[in-house]
Amino acid sequence: MFSFESKAQCPANDSTSMGSSTSSDVFYNFANHTVSTISNTNWHMAFSVQASRFPTNPANGVAIRVNSGGNGTVLKKLNGANAANWRAIDTAGLSKLPTLLDSDSTWDLSAFTKGYKISDPFNFVWGSYNATTHNVEGTNVYVLYNNAAGWYKKVFVKECAFDSLWTVVISNLDNSDSNNIVINKKSYPNKLFVYYNASTNQLIDREPVKSSWDLVWTKYVTFVTSQQGSGFYPVAGVLSNPSVTVEQNNGKKCNEVWLNNRTSAVNPSISAIGHDWKTFTGTAYVITDTFVYFVKGQDGKMYKMTFKGYAGGPLGKSTFNFYEAKTSISEVSPNHAFSVYPNPNNGVLSIQSDINILTVNVIDMQGKTVFSSNTAEMMDISSLSNGMYVISLNTSEGVYHQQIIKE
């Protein structure tokens, strides 16, 4: 079946499921659909395995993210704590220290680099770049805790050597269960992060190669404005691959906006799609059908995406419509040559085709068949109201569609 730009009602044609309590990440590719579904509760820290982008953005290679959304892990930076007083750190007033959160705008800024400024490009907060050794050397001690798992840990990132080798010390607050984490970035080619479980002291290679996915359905913490109270809360939403661009077009439904009449611009945030396409009313989720996303995938194609439904509970299921975006309602890419003419029409139209047409149906924008014919020549649809319709052709080789306009 060939693609066309605007389908009646833009019915759902794909879905993802994050499972019960949205406990899985779903990595998705427009060309191949779901790439992998992986638990998002089995890690606590994620270490960048990317090469730092000197000199424009060196922070990407030294980011350390924290799983605040997936399993409620909390990170705080201790005042005055460093390697010299590591064994006798003072955690008094810990509850009053600010919680450090990952950026939901870029993969490059993390909880451990919270406060990083491009004006001071080699101060990465957890440590600073040493121009003599060419290592980023740790300067601060952090407390990482997870109430559900029942532990508090202290963390000192000793260094990231030559932008290739992480060395991290983690132990209980009383210095028991001390572990050295050593991570060679080169062991994880074409990945963004490698993940660490602080309960089991295990590294987890859970992420598909970055060239294989466009979007990830995940749980993350962001600022939420609501009538019940605004603040930072975990949400289930969609983040984009750093190589993918996203535009959000507002105010028109999916069958009203195309490449040539969209008013959207690229939003550089990884949460450009995010979570706010759905709203919970207290009893059900309502979808905003005038949020239409134009996503340029890693295959170089522009896709148009609209959410159609969301179910929480045991499913965590998002349903959506997507297809390759076209310039206008009349642009098609058929596997077989045919033409509908004239288009627009004043009530009489014909179809020429290189394959056998069995029946023709005209469908309105509510999905109702309003005209049928066994012939494709000189069809009289003058009794129909002016507007937009979809021609559905039942042929010897399948069903094809094209949008028409009656004037």
Image (spheres, helix red, strand yellow):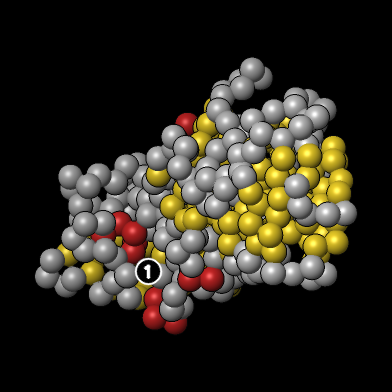
* Most foreground residue, 211 or 400: 400
Say how many tags the image has. Answer: 1
Q: Position of residue 91 (x, y in %)?
A: 46, 43
Does the image show residue 92? no
Residue furthest out toward the left: 132
Residue occupying the point 17% across, 64% down: 130
Residue occupying the point 61% across, 22% down: 226
* Most foreground residue, 305 or 225: 305
Q: Position of residue 240 (x, y in %)?
A: 50, 54
Does the image show residue 282? yes
Residue occupying the point 61% across, 39% down: 344
Instruction: Tell me where residue 379 sits by quadrant.
Output: top right
Left or right of 116 on screen, residue 154: right
Which quadrant is the C terminus positioned in? top right
Q: Position of residue 43 (x, y in %)?
A: 60, 61
- Above-or-below relation of 231 to 360: above
- Above-or-below relation of 293 to 192: above
Left or right of 279 on screen, residue 83: left
Q: Position of residue 399 (x, y in %)?
A: 79, 61
Which quadrant is the N terminus positioned in? bottom right
* Most foreground residue, 367 or 285: 367
Residue furthest out toward the bottom: 187
Q: Kindly identify which residue carries mark 1.
A: 50
* Most foreground residue, 315 or 3: 3
Crowding near the residue tagged with mark 1, few <14, some 14–19, many ≥20 C-alpha atoms within 10 Å: many
Residue occupying the point 16% across, 72% down: 133
**Amino acid at pointer 1:** Gln
Left or right of 46 on screen, residue 322: right
